[in-house]
C-alpha cells in the first residue's frame, strides 16, 4: 500500500495594514512588502518608502509609481490601484495616462493667471521706474494672486474678477481696486496677444467699482502766503543741500522724485536747461526744464559743494545716493507747514494754479508740468514743444516769485499775446 502525501497548502500573503507599513525598517538591500493585486510598498536602504503597482499591459510587465508613504496612505494607494485596474479593463495604460495627467497639470500651471502675469511683468517692467514696478508687483502678490493666481487665465470670468475687486473695495482701498483691475486688463490683453486667452473680462467691469476720491496734494496758492513760504525757505537753518532743494523746487516745479534724482550731467548751465532722461520721468519721455536766472544762481551756489559728484542733491550719508524722498517734506515740516498746508508736490499745484490764472497758454503749462501725453509716440517727439514760450514763462514765473519773497506789492505779470 502506497504512502499518500497530502499536497502542501499555499498560503497567500496577508494584506498590509497601517502598523506594518509604519514599522517597516530599512535593510541592507531594498525590499518589498506586498499588499494585494500587484500593489506593494517599496522600502529603500535609506528608509524612504514608496507605493508601486505591478501590472501587465499588451503582454509587457510594467510598474506604476503611486507616491511616497506616509504622504500617500494605504487607503489612498489602494484607491489608486483600483483606478489603474479600471483603466486596464478599458484597455488603457495607467502609466501613459499618468504621463498625460502630469503634462496637463504642467500646461495648466504654465497658463495660469500668475504665470502669465509674471511673464508680462518681466517683459514690460524694464521700461518702468523701480518704484512703479515694485508697487505693481506688490499689488498683484497681495490682492490678486492669492485669489485667481492658480486659475487658468482663459477660464477666469468677469464675476470672479469682480469678487476680488470687491474685497479691496470693502476695506476702503477703492483706488487700489481700480489699479488692480487696470493691471489685470493689461495681463488679459497680453494673454490674448500670445494666444492663451480669448477675451479680457476686466472690460466688463466698467462702472462696477465706485470712482476713487480724487486726492489733491496740499499746496499754498495765495500770493501773500507764497511770499511767506519763500521767506521761510530763505531763513532755513538746516543742511545747505536741503535748503537749495527747497529754493529750487518752486522755480522748476518738477515732481519730488525728479528733483532729488537730478544729476549734474543732465544740467547745462550755459544753455540754462535741465534735460531729464526719459527713464526718470513718470511718462517715460525726456523732459526739458528751462532754467531761470534765479534757478541758475541756486545751482551755481550748490555746484561748489556737490559739483564733483553725480547727484545735484546727494544724500547726507553717501554722495553715491540721492537725498531721501522725505528730505524736502521733512524740511517743510520743520518750517512749520503741516501735511494739510504744503507738500513737495504742492510746488507743482502752486505753479499750475497761478500760471493758469495769469493767462499763460494751458498747453505750455501742461507740457512744462510733463503731464501725460496719450500718444506716447507723439510725446517722444514733442518734449521740446512750446519751448520758447516755456522759457519766457519760467523766467517771468521766477521774477514773480522773487517779488513775492521780497514782499513787494506787484501785479500779476503781463503776458504778451
Image (cartoon, rainbow, N blue to C red):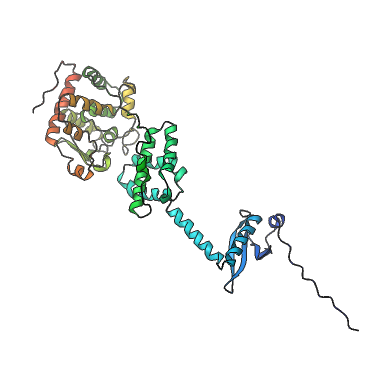
Image x and y of residue 135, in percent: 37, 39
The answer to which image quadrant residue 159 occupies is top left
Residue positioned most to the bottom: 1
Image x and y of residue 250, in percent: 23, 27
Image x and y of residue 146, in percent: 47, 43
Give the number of callouts: 0
Q: Residue at x 42, y 33 (%)?
A: 169
* Residue 48 appears in the rendering: no
Q: Quadrant of the N terminus?
A: bottom right
Residue positioned most to the left: 417
Q: Quadrant of the C terminus?
A: top left
Is 118 rendered above or below residue 342? below
Q: Residue at x 87, y 79 (%)?
A: 4
Is 73 rendered above or below residue 302? below
* Side (left or right) of 365 relative to 129: left
Is 330 rendered above or below residue 51? above
* Residue 154 appears in the rendering: yes
Image x and y of residue 243, in percent: 27, 26
The answer to which image quadrant residue 90 occupies is bottom right
* Side (left or right) of 120 relative to 105: left
Q: Pick whichever, 131 or 349, lies toward us.
A: 349
The answer to which image quadrant residue 16 occupies is bottom right
Q: Pick whichever, 342 or 190, lies toward us.
A: 190
Amino acid at each position: 500500500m502506497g504512502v499518500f502525501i497530502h499536497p502542501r497548502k499555499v498560503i497567500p500573503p496577508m494584506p498590509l495594514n497601517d502598523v506594518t507599513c509604519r514599522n517597516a525598517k530599512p535593510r541592507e538591500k531594498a525590499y518589498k512588502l506586498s499588499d494585494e493585486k500587484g500593489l506593494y510598498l517599496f522600502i529603500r536602504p535609506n528608509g524612504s518608502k514608496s507605493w508601486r503597482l505591478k501590472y501587465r499591459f499588451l503582454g509587457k510587465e510594467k510598474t506604476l509609481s503611486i507616491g511616497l508613504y506616509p504622504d500617500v496612505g494605504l487607503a489612498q494607494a489602494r484607491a489608486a490601484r483600483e483606478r489603474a485596474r479600471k483603466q486596464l479593463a478599458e484597455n488603457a495604460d495607467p502609466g501613459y495616462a499618468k504621463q498625460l495627467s502630469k503634462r496637463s497639470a504642467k500646461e495648466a500651471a504654465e497658463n495660469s493667471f500668475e504665470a502669465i502675469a509674471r511673464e508680462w511683468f518681466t517683459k514690460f517692467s524694464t521700461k518702468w521706474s523701480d518704484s512703479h514696478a515694485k508697487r505693481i508687483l506688490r499689488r498683484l502678490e497681495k490682492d490678486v494672486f492669492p485669489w485667481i493666481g492658480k486659475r487658468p487665465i482663459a477660464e477666469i470670468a468677469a464675476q470672479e474678477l469682480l469678487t476680488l475687486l470687491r474685497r479691496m473695495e470693502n476695506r476702503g482701498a477703492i483706488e487700489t481696486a481700480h489699479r488692480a483691475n487696470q493691471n489685470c486688463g493689461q495681463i488679459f490683453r497680453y494673454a490674448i496677444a500670445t494666444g492663451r486667452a480669448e477675451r479680457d473680462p476686466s472690460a466688463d467691469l466698467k462702472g462696477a467699482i465706485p470712482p476713487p476720491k480724487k486726492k489733491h496734494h496740499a499746496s499754498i496758492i495765495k500770493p501773500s502766503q507764497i511770499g511767506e513760504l519763500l521767506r521761510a525757505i530763505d531763513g532755513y537753518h538746516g543742511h545747505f543741500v536741503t535748503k537749495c532743494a527747497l529754493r529750487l523746487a518752486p522755480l522748476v516745479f518738477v515732481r519730488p522724485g525728479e528733483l532729488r534724482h537730478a544729476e549734474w550731467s543732465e544740467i547745462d548751465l550755459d544753455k540754462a536747461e535741465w534735460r531729464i532722461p526719459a527713464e526718470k520721468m513718470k511718462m517715460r519721455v525726456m523732459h526739458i526744464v528751462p532754467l531761470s536766472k534765479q534757478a541758475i544762481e541756486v545751482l551755481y551756489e550748490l555746484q561748489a559743494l556737490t559739483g564733483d559728484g553725480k547727484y545735484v542733491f546727494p544724500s547726507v550719508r553717501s554722495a553715491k545716493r540721492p537725498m531721501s524722498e522725505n528730505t524736502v517734506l521733512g524740511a517743510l515740516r520743520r518750517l512749520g507747514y503741516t501735511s494739510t498746508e504744503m507738500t513737495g508736490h504742492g510746488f507743482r499745484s502752486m505753479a499750475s494754479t497761478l500760471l493758469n490764472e495769469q493767462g499763460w497758454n494751458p498747453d505750455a503749462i501742461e507740457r512744462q508740468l510733463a503731464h501725460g501725453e496719450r500718444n506716447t509716440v507723439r510725446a517722444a517727439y514733442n518734449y521740446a514743444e512750446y519751448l520758447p514760450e516755456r522759457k519766457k514763462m519760467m523766467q517771468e514765473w521766477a521774477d514773480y516769485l522773487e517779488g513775492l519773497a521780497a514782499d513787494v506789492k506787484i501785479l500779476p505779470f503781463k503776458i504778451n499775446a
